[in-house]
Amino acid sequence: MKIALFASAAVITLVAFGSNAALAQSRDTIQVAGSSTVLPFASIVAEEFGAAFPEFNTPVVGSGGTGGGFSQFCEGIGDNTIDIANASRPIKDGEREACNQSGVTDIREIQFGFDGIVFASAASGPDFALTPVQVYKAIAAQVVVDGELVDNPYKSWSEVDASLPDQPIALAVPASNHGTREVFQERVVGAGCEEAGLPEGLSEDEAESACSTLRQDVVTEISGDYTETLARLNSDKNTVGVFGLSFYEQNTDTLKVATIDGVVPSKETVAAGDYPVSRPLYFYVKGQHIGVIPGLQEFVQFFLSEGMAGEGGTLEAAGLIPQPTEKTDEVLAAFEAGAAE
Amino acid sequence: MTDTLSTTRSASQERTKAIRAGLRRRHMSEAIFKGLGLAAIILALGFVALLFVDVVRRGLPAFTQSNLHLAVTYDPEIIDIEPAPVMVPGQSEADFRAANLKWQRDLAMLNWNKVIEASLRAAAPAGFEIESREILSIAETNARHEVRAMFVDDPGLLGQTVEVDLLASANADNWIKGNIDRSLGDAQQQLSAPARQLIDIFVENGTISTGFAWAIFTNVDSRAAPASAGLLGALVGTLYMMLIVIVLAVPIGVASAIYLEEFAPKSRLTDFIEVNINNLAAVPSIVFGLLGAAVFINYLHLPISAPIVGGLVLTLMTLPTIIIATRGALLGVSPALRQAALGMGASKTQMVFHHVLPVTFPSILTATILGVAHALGETAPLLLIGMKAFVAQVPATPFDQATALPVQIYLWQGNENRNFFEPRTAAAIIVLLAVMICLNGIAIYLRSRLEKRA
């Protein structure tokens, strides 16, 4: 037993020394975190990068949502902070400030493509043909009835609009840690609210809250991944879920997509700008880590290359909607020039 | 006289009656308690059985996988590249390595999908009409890397045809297994109609066959090529963490328990420490994760997503369990043993280490293994120290990024390709359960052996 104790004491010392040695040597694997919408794309590029560049390690890609990614990204600079934050919305001023305060001053924005946001329901259920106004009316906490702002009285979709199926309203939306939520709020609920119109005489704050507050009885906020939304759809067939287009396309056997303003979401309609609810996808690179973490610059170039994010590239097969080549060239030039933004 | 006699008799009859009634009540409550206990056990076993049956039913199909047997031709027209660099006399090691690296990179830039497509077309019936994107969707996307890696290993393959075993794509596997309802229309299928037709032809002519899914044990996680996703990285990450837990938690835990129980004076301070250890054992594991992120990553600057941090966090979590169990075991040793040892002139240290501790080995061992098994299945604290990242490499040291088995289950559960990853998640759960059962089995075996010896 004595020997065992001595041996373990020796091992502890060794571990302590080992950790010191590891601290002295700089990290040689790129570390990425953030948006779960971008995660599949970033992971695929990471794997391909590891396969194409034998001299670099395969980057590690974490999730946590766009907001979670930025809070990790803005913790500071150095080995134990991430190099790239994935985002499904642009960085906010507040986040940029937090970054600057902790010394992250060189933030380079990379836009690499588009994603559509779709409403999907169980494949066995009825078809949905939605408009932003209908969605707003179905899920806003207060809606206008006879010129007055009252608590939302609608129970089923057919009450909102006679063209919709007679099915109880239930909507699963991403929680606010997801960038998808912001786009949903702005492009669907906000747009619907504007179109529906609010009564006169509301202050700006009141109007904004009337346009953005969702009712809690029929709306479920999902903070996890899209699989969690899918699980909710499977347990309650009446639920309509908000998904990324790429997720829907991989699960067409269980999901049925709703049209928005009569447009069926697809790569083509999003790329052409016909489908109204789409957003650009980004990742943000910590400029101060370029040249410190090996392969960071090459990773960004590889990500934007024709074979990855370009038309007909690997990411398109995984559901990304490529952006025009000119845009990619512009982004890449800005990145290489080192211009923040 | 008769009067008193009859009263006593009736009194005793009364008494017997009361006793009988009481007895019946006591028997009844005993029977009820037994019945409830039995029902509880049956209920618990029923749930365990339900869980096992469900997981096994879902997971077993994932242990087999569709493989493609192709004759791959390294066509010089597609692989248009200079011969691999050879080391010439006078060339420095670094120069040669640079030249070799450049050659490998040039090789990676070639369109290896053309090689795969050609061999798939060669296996298809003559004149079968199918687009290249559709035919490529049958093979997993890592096929081109596999074929290239073979070429890197042996550049002499140029112009030759070799038999290669590749993985069929996840969607092809879904189609063959019927994970996606085969009667659904084109719009709801992942593969196009000609691709599905060709897969069925391949299954018939033996180009595609089903075999054991070794990928689960020999590969790391993959998103680009889902069919090749495996648990190797997570297994190694878990192994590192368990090693760290055993190396740190057992000596520290046992030593503190011995000190507290045998040497420390009974004072307010030791009482306070004892209360705290008991409280620590009841702290939710996610709190240890927060602590780990704050102390080990932000303050001590240990790497994120690394098993070293995971191991340290799980050590903190396991320590109280081991301390409490060891103290319990030490308390259970009869005072006669101690007094006898002291009476023979042994010092206190000798008494503890030579006589008391060996008796407690079986209990300490069991507590340790159960503690480690608990740590093995722990997920929540790992999520907070960045271990839920996608890692496509086997960690070489505990300082490299890695995932762990339970986290891998969590990650696969969230994968977009539900039809393929639902069974594979269940398969990962089976692997985790198997490891746990093995650990518990070892605990029981060692305990019974040591108890016999003691």
Image: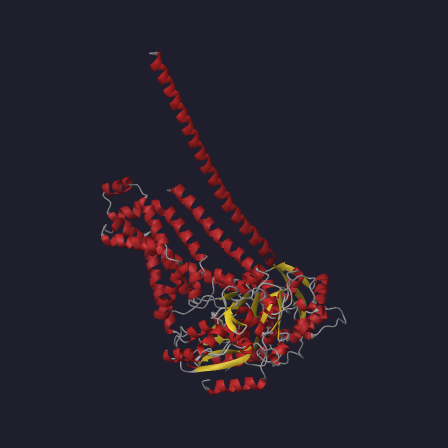
Residue A115 percent location from the top left of the image: 57, 76
Q: State the residue at coordinates (48%, 53%).
A: B436
Which residue occupies the foreground of this view, B221 or B118? B221
Residue A48 percent location from the top left of the image: 55, 74
Judge from the rendering whether residue B141 lies leftward or rightward of residue A340; answer left or right: right
Which residue occupies the foreground of this view, A274 or B290? A274
Q: Is residue A160 visible?
A: yes
Which residue occupies the foreground of this view, A61 or A135? A135
Q: Looking at the rendering, which quadrant does residue A22 occupy?
A: bottom left
Q: Looking at the rendering, which quadrant does residue B192 occupy?
A: bottom right
Judge from the rendering whether residue B112 lies leftward or rightward of residue A289; answer left or right: right
Total numbered badges shown on the rendered structure: 0
| Quadrant in the picture for the C terminus of chain B | top left
Residue B319 percent location from the top left of the image: 36, 56
Q: Is residue B167 visible?
A: no
Residue A108 percent location from the top left of the image: 46, 82
| Quadrant in the picture for the N terminus of chain B | top left
Judge from the rendering whether residue B85 lies leftward or rightward of residue B204; answer left or right: left
**The residue positioned farthest toward the top in the image shown:** B1
**The residue positioned farthest toward the front in the image shown:** A146
Position above or below: B273 against A303: above
Which residue occupies the foreground of this view, A118 or B37? A118
- Scheme of image coloration: secondary structure
